[in-house]
Image (cartoon, rainbow, N blue to C red):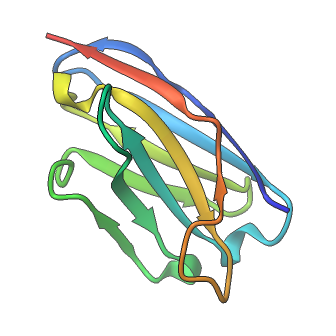
């Protein structure tokens, strides 16, 4: 069983920055694919960024490319999302998720952290 706990959300003005953290426990973190998703108010959940296991690279939604950076520290069992040049449309609840080896979907999710960007 994998447990995920996000932190680092908050309120910021447009153009500002925040860094989200997601601490994982249970299993072998370095072998997990890790993702960040978000759910804007009144909308469905959407993909933001992913970090594939064993250094197999990263991917981003077009809406955040060049502004957000996903990174991971396998020694700390933590994945980060550095968010720069924030826009009001980035306002959402942000979730991290884990994909364990052999699976094609994210099976484990954190509780979410609120990010609010004001204009």
x 39%, y 42%: residue: 38
Please provide percent x and percent y for residue 24: 74, 52
Image quadrant of residue 65?
A: bottom left
89 to the left or right of 30: left
User: In this picture, is 117 found above or below 104?
Assistant: above
- Comparing 42 with 61, the one in front is 42
x 66%, y 89%: residue: 102
* Count of number-bearing discs: 0
Instruction: Give the position of the N terminus as an image quadrant.
Output: bottom right
User: In this picture, is 55 found above or below 93?
Assistant: below
Please provide percent x and percent y for residue 108: 67, 58
User: In this picture, is 100 found above or below 12?
Assistant: below
User: In this picture, is 112 found above or below 49?
Assistant: above
x 18%, y 29%: residue: 89
Please provide percent x and percent y for residue 32: 64, 72
Please provide percent x and percent y for residue 55: 51, 79
29 to the left or right of 85: right
82 to the left or right of 96: left
């Amino acid at each position: 069983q994998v447990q995920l706990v996000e932190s680092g959300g908050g309120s910021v003005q447009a153009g500002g920055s925040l860094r989200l953290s997601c601490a994982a426990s249970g299993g072998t973190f370095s072998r997990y694919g890790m993702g960040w998703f978000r759910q804007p108010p009144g909308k469905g959940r959407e993909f933001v960024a992913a970090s594939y296991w064993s250094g197999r690279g990263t991917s981003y939604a077009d809406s955040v490319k060049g502004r957000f950076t996903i990174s991971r520290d396998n020694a700390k069992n933590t994945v980060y999302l550095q968010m720069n040049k924030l826009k009001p449309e980035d306002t959402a609840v942000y979730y991290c998720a884990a994909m364990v080896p052999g699976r094609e979907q994210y099976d484990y999710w954190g509780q979410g952290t609120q990010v609010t960007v004001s204009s």
